[in-house]
Amino acid sequence: MTSLTGESHGCGSYPAPADGWLWEITLAAGLGVAPEVLIERRGIHGRDWLKTGRGTHDVHWSPEASEALLQALAGVSTLPVKRVHAVTVARADFVNRKIMHGVFEGQTVVVRVSNASLFVPGMMVLAEHFEGATWDYRGNPDCPEKGCKLPRRKGVW
């Protein structure tokens, strides 16, 4: 496996992504589709996309493949769209540290998170809305490309 600098890590040798290659997560957000849609539509490894790390979404798409994907998705209107929204934390001091209350469009919602003790009222977070009242924490709205990272310390990104 190769890192972005091009050195091999023993699992094979692939060229490092050159300029113009896009992160899969950024491409999905730009197109307004779930990353799972892109995973299903990946082409040939090495030409269309490269795995650049150990994470699930440590994948880069080539400029040609991303353009082809954009044209393919242009005529499709029934793609699942991610429902990620900015939510303001209202309360995060519950005994159950895996939930916190947030406010979205004037309504109180329950957001599931791995550790709510690092959040304070007034913080903005990204949360993905599923069917019903289910919301999941998805990260910092100022840096969505970092994924589901928690704050460094209480109240500080």
Image: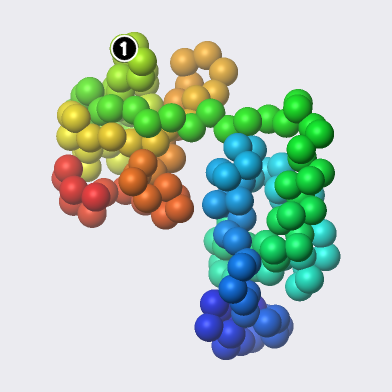
Q: How is the image coloured?
A: rainbow
Instruction: Place residue 118 in its image quadrant.
Output: top left
Where is the N terminus found, in terms of image quarters?
bottom right
Task: Identify the amino acid type marked 1.
Answer: Gly
Image point (42%, 47%), residue name: 144
How far from the left and from the top, in percent, is residue 153?
Answer: 18, 51
Tell me where residue 48 sits by quadrant: bottom right
From the viewer's perspective, tell me whether residue 8 is left or right of residue 150.
Answer: right
Badge 1 local density, few (<14 within 10 Å), some, or many (20+)?
A: few
Who is closer to the viewer here, 64 or 147?
Answer: 64
Residue 77 relative to residue 18: left or right: right
Q: Residue at x 28, y 27 (%)?
A: 88
Residue designated by label 1: 106
Q: Position of 142 compared to 92: left or right? A: right
- How many numbered discs? 1
Looking at the rendered structure, the secondary structure element under dot 1 is loop
- The answer to whether any part of residue 42 appears in the image is no
User: Residue 84: percent from the left, percent from the top?
Assistant: 48, 32
Picture layout, residue 152 above or below residue 101: below
* Image side of residue 50 versus residue 93, left or right: right
Q: Residue at x 57, y 45 (%)?
A: 30
Which of the pair 157/70 is nearer the observer? 70
